[in-house]
Amino acid sequence: MTLNTEDILKNLNENQTEAVTTEAQHALVLAGAGSGKTRVLVHRIAWLIAAEYVSPYSILAVTFTNKAAAEMRNRIAFMLQREIRDMWIGTFHGIALKLLQINTEAAGLPKNFQILDSDDQYRLIRRCLADLELDEKQWPPRTIQAFINDQKNDGLRAHEVEDFGDHNNQTLIKVFGHYDDHCQRAGLVDFAEMLLRAHELLLNDQAVLQKYRQRFSHILVDEFQDTNAIQSAFIQLLAGAQNKVLVVGDDDQSIYAWRGARVDHILDFQNLYANTALYKLEQNYRSTQTILDAANGVIANNKKRLGKNLWSAQEKGDPVGVYGAHSEFDEAFFVGEKIESLLAETTSADDIAILYRSNAQSRLLEEALLKRSIPYQIYGGLRFFERLEIKDVLAYSRLVNNRHDDIGFERVINTPTRGIGLKTVNLIRNYAQMQQSSLWQAAQTLIQEKKLTQRAATSLAAFINLIDELESNNQDQPLEQLFSDVIERTALKDHYLKEPPEKAQTRLENLDELINAAETFVISEEDAALGLTPLAAFLAQVSLDAGDTSQVNEPHVQLMTLHSAKGLEFPVVFIVGMEQGLFPHQNSMEDFNKLQEERRLAYVGITRAEKQLFMSYATSRRMRGKINACQPSQFLREIPKELIQQIRGNIHPTQYVSSPQTRTPYQSQRQTVPDSPYQIGQTVRHNSFGEGVITDMSGKGDYLQVLVQFNDVGPKVLAVKFAKLEIL
Ligand code: ATP
Ligand code: MG
């Protein structure tokens, strides 16, 4: 079939066409968000195949996620109307792994080498510490893990790390070396090793290098601003003097410095690669002018930028809707309500995304969507109650609630490890089957009948004791007390803390959020009438919600962290939690470079929106068990005022007082809900919780909910229809 190459160019502007058809050896497309960089890359590949008769076999394309790779492959196949099997397209890790698998021997690996995930790596590091007789307290395994991975990301082996002569550094280097020796002997490859080893493979084996240099005449990389040292070196080595490299990226969207990515690689590209043509794309096709101006307003506050002129031919569009919520509940309510009204118009759920800074923020948003039966998915992650740490704590709680819960038992019997091995677990399983009993009963019988080794019996008895104590200590205690007890007494917290820092932090934030959920949980009248305990009611609610998953093909709202939104676009975007300390994140506020990276993340978030953008903050939010008064994010104030429509509240508080006419109808409706006697600030009394003050309200009619700060029991969200509150 002959292919009309003009078709490949027909939907490109002049600058894009120049980049796609470039005759320069190397090309750098440096342009702002939504200007068609990814589109250029995809069309360039199609162009190479159709117009320059380059075999797909000779093309290597690097994307940021596996999903993006699959999408790109499809788009090219569609454009060319044929399959393009031989082309290599994938993430840096995927490509490195493939190289190692094909060239195991040259890479110095056994045929059946194994991949070490982060947990395996951690465990191995602990073993190495034991081998070297180093105390884990003084040498925390996760610090060592981070050290090793950082060095590898920078392309360094143990003997290459600079030895400053200080004991601390020397010890780190020693463990690194020992760990690497062990991996080598056992044929183990961790994630950072994949890249380093693939780079070394090319560096040390001329035959292999020549083979791939000859093969990949064209190398293309998307999101180049987020490459780390070893990735950048890998591309340079493979390119050699002859091959052609095209990279696309945006210095303003570099958001992975914390993983070793360096924006310098894109800034230095022209120096590293002679004969580079630079292409700048200035037209943004994604967003309205308003959204673009908002993004530009924010990013203009960063220093050391290349600077770009980005414009949109699209209409001005709606202003950015900013909602200042009373609390995190009110925020989630706003998002749920707004989405419901959008869906009632013409918007499809697929067109909507909710972005947040921290994973734990998803819980209340999920709840708000579930309440309205709006299908949703967590992009690239798990729903709140499906997350490992949440399931662990709930599994313990389920056992406390019902000892015969076999699933809970299996999950936590040896999590965290307490010396109950698979052999013992199998024995319990078989015994339970034989005597037709629960695992719990079987375990007890096995102990009584002395059918276990002394060691196994002691560990198992301690486990049984632990669960019994968790129950007896928490009789008549609030639910949150049980959850925090589980977290502390089972040593789960320490268990997660041994993981790499970012992962551990996310898990602990999720656990904090679980405590928040328990604190504000109120058992419904129906459940109470059925005689359910708050724990049983809470667990039942979680199971019900978990069963409420939408069909795969059904349109659904996407929830995701700002980091995982990179490269994506949606007609309607909500960015929630726009507060100082949350976004910019607490850990980044004091540090100039980190703050700049947070701002780039805000820029990434804003530029995901095509038509409508809503941003929200709460003036009070529960975090780590405390209610904090919160300030709107500085990034909100960096958006030019005239682009914002303040739906409620005011990010410029001084004006708020002096110009009451800026209050919107929505706002007054929120302070006092029509046809309801309740108001924010009112003191109320509840039959069992006592006195408290209403600090937030959401919903109307039968769905009206209030958040009450009770003097004795803290905050509770109550449906007024059932709560029978007395106004004092
Ligand atoms: P990001 O920086 O967020 O990764 P990007 O620069 O890669 O963005 P693309 O995702 O390639 O931008 O393009 C943004 C949107 O604009 C896409 O929907 C794309 O299809 C559209 N687009 C790009 N160029 C054109 C064009 N010439 N005509 C019409 N639509 C275009
Ligand atoms: Mg892109």
Image (tube, rainbow, N blue to C red):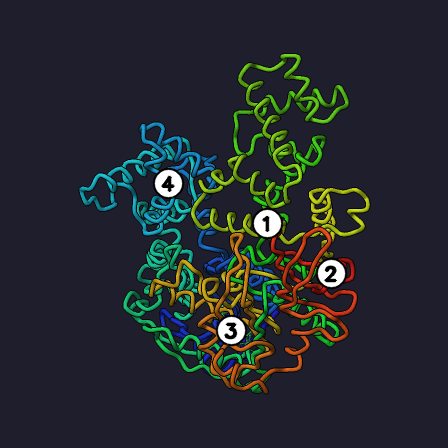
Q: Name the image quarter holding residue 365.
A: bottom right
692 up-or-down from 544: above or below: below
**Is the C terminus in the top left, top right, bottom left or bottom right quadrant?**
bottom right
Write down the residue under mark 2.
Answer: 725
Sequence order check: which comes first, mark 3 or mark 4? 4
Write down the residue under mark 4.
Answer: 106
Which type of secondary structure does the marked residue at label 3 adopt?
Answer: loop
Which type of secondary structure does the marked residue at label 1 adopt?
Answer: helix
Q: Is residue 561 left or right of residue 386?
A: left
Disc 4 crowd, CA 10 A, few/some/many (<14, 14-19, 20+):
some
Res. 722 visible in picture? yes
Sequence order check: which comes first, mark 1 or mark 3? 1
Q: Is residue 24 left or right of residue 622?
A: left
Which type of secondary structure does the marked residue at label 2 adopt?
Answer: loop
**Is the N terminus in the top left, top right, bottom left or bottom right quadrant?**
bottom right
544 up-or-down from 699: above or below: above
